[in-house]
Image: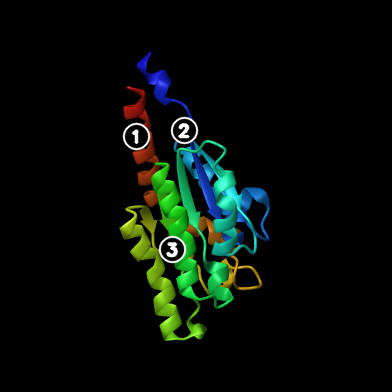
Amino acid sequence: LMQTSYSKNIRVLILGDSLIAGYGLLKENGFVDQLQKKFDNEKYNIKLVNGGVSGETSTGLNNRFEWILDDKFDGIVISTGANDALRGIDPQITSKNIENILLHLEKIQIPTMLIGMKAPNNLGSDYVKEFNDIYPKLAEKYETFFYPFFLKDVVLKPALNQKDMIHPNEQGVKIIVENIYPQFLLFYKTLKNQLSSKNK
């Protein structure tokens, strides 16, 4: 009988831009759906919710995220900033936006995972360094789960990207999911443990 209280689905919202939304892909080939399928195959009770909006900057996310939270989630994943870098937005602005979101989630005690992004090298080494540093710094400061670079092993590889060379194709997403899964699983297990200790 004890089992029943823990068998409920853990709901995790994944906030981000087109990389999360699944730009240019059939729904089932996008990141959230492929990751969900992997969890389902392993028989884990988790429901991932796609909170990706194509073209969105960290400022856009910072402006919308509070009303998203009216819905109840057990954990939140944040993957934003790629469009900030593509537009050359000041990294301090990106950092402030992400920090504001993390601060709010800390206040309302929703566990978070931060997914890092890297700036394209053509923006110059100062910009790239300042931008790339945002994520590990904030992850440490807010003690979030952390995955350093969403596009690891996929970035700039023609076979793994759509024609624009920015958005991964179905194969690219598959590699991203395989790479990120171990860290995501840790996040899920932590959420599950927290829930079951609350329910006792």
Q: What is the distance, in whole Å, between disc 2 and disc 1 at their CAs?
A: 15 Å
Q: Residues within 10 Å of mark 3 (few under 14, many from 20)?
A: many
Tell me which residue sits at (40%, 25%) in the image.
6
Tell me which residue sits at (58%, 73%) in the image.
158
Q: Amino acid at mark 3?
A: Gly
Label of residue 45 in the image? 2
Earlier-in-chain disc, 1 versus 3: 3
Q: What is the distance, in whole Å, between disc 1 and disc 3 at their CAs?
A: 25 Å
Q: Nearer the viewer, mark 3 or mark 2?
A: 3
Label of residue 116 in the image? 3
Earlier-in-chain disc, 2 versus 1: 2
Image coordinates for residue 94, horizontal then vertical, percent: 49, 68
**Callout 3 touching callout 2 (CB < 8 Å):** no
Q: What is the distance, in whole Å, between disc 3 and disc 2 at their CAs?
A: 26 Å
Which quadrant holds the C terminus?
top left
Q: Residues within 10 Å of mark 2 (few under 14, many from 20)?
A: some
Q: Nearer the viewer, mark 2 or mark 1?
A: 1
Give left or right: position of 77 versus 21: left
Image coordinates for residue 63, horizontal then vertical, percent: 58, 56
Tag 1 residue: 194
Q: Amino acid at mark 1?
A: Gln
Which quadrant holds the N terminus?
top left
Query: Looking at this rendering, what residue extends furthest in the top direction?
Result: 1
Query: Disc 1 on helix, strand or loop?
Result: helix
